[in-house]
Structures are given as C-alpha cells and as structure tokens.
Amino acid sequence: MDMVKIIMVEDDPGHARLIEKNFRRVGIDNEIAIIANGQAVFDYFDQSYSRQREPEQLLILLDLNLPVIDGYQVLARLKTDERTKEIPVIVLTTTDVPHEVKKCYELGCNLFISKPIQYDQFCSTIRSLGLLLSIAKIPSG
C-alpha cells in the first residue's frame, strides 16, 4: 500500500492502539491519522480540501458507534460528496447484525469487517486485514 494514508475513525483509544499495533506487526507502516468522532471526519476533509494541495491516496477505517455523528451518517456523507466518494471505506465495527451490514453496503462501504470481542481473535482479524491491505490497490486523489 504505497503512500496511502489511513484515516482511522475510532473513538476507543484502546482499539485504535491495537489496530495500529497489529498493522505494524504485518508490515503496514503507512501514516495513520486517528479521528475520534464523526464530526471530526468532516472537519478533517474541509481543512484538507481548503488547503488546495495535491490529492492524497486515502483509505478510511470507519467504526459505526461514534460520538457526535455516527458512522452511518459519516459513510452516507462521504459517499455522496464528490470530493470523497471514491475513497475506499472499510467499516470496522463490533456489530455483525445482518441488516446493519446490508445498510452499510447500501450506503457504499467497500468492505464490512466485524471486530471480534475476544482479544486474540481481534488481533488476528486486524493482522489479516493488514495483510489484505498490503496487496490492495487504492485509487489516487
């Protein structure tokens, strides 16, 4: 995943640290920006696009259970905004309820992954995701 910046939208600092730690274990050394609530995602993109710089290659890891603005609303806005609609979004959340999974795909997520509750399974899942990302192709800009 050359030069791809990962935007991790995660309000649980423990989960954020574990995700980053397990990505590093499988060789994902990309820059990771951690954003702790839904509104801050929009603030990030408003600031980023107002600076008129070269578009970055981005990948978003999105939790659904977020303060201020929830992940469903974040996903819906990202996928309807011309500036962000092509950024790949991986929903990474604790739920695995079928209608919620379906809703995320209908809103435009690119991949839905449930975070296991058990520590070892959580770490294994994140390492597997990291291995997948290491061979994924991400669109630029």
Image (spheres, helix red, strand yellow):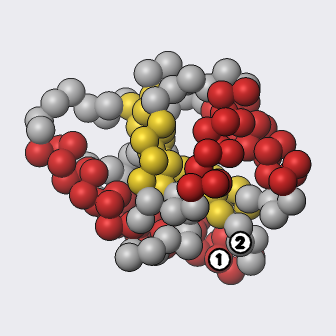
Residue at image point 62% right, 26% down? 28
Q: Which mark is residue 100?
A: 1
Residue at image point 67% right, 21% down? 27
Q: Which mark is residue 2?
A: none
10 Å neighbourhood of mark 1: few (<14), some, or many (≥20)? some
Q: Residue 88 placed where, x, y %?
A: 48, 46
Image quarter of residue 74: bottom left
Q: Is residue 86 visible?
A: yes
Residue type, numbered disc 1: Glu
For the C terminus, which image quadrant? top left
Alpha carbons under labels 2 and 1: distance apart? 8 Å
Residue type, numbered disc 2: Thr
Q: Are marks 2 and 1 in contact (CB under 8 Å)?
A: yes
Q: Residue 79 placed where, x, y %?
A: 38, 60
- Viewer-nearest residue: 116 or 77: 116
Say which of marks 2 and 1 sits in front. 2
Q: Secondary structure at mark 2?
A: loop
Which residue is outermost to the front? 14
- Viewer-nearest residue: 26 or 54: 26
10 Å neighbourhood of mark 2: few (<14), some, or many (≥20)? some
Q: Residue at label 2?
A: 95
How many tags in the picture? 2
Q: Is residue 79 visible?
A: no
For the N terminus, which image quadrant? top right
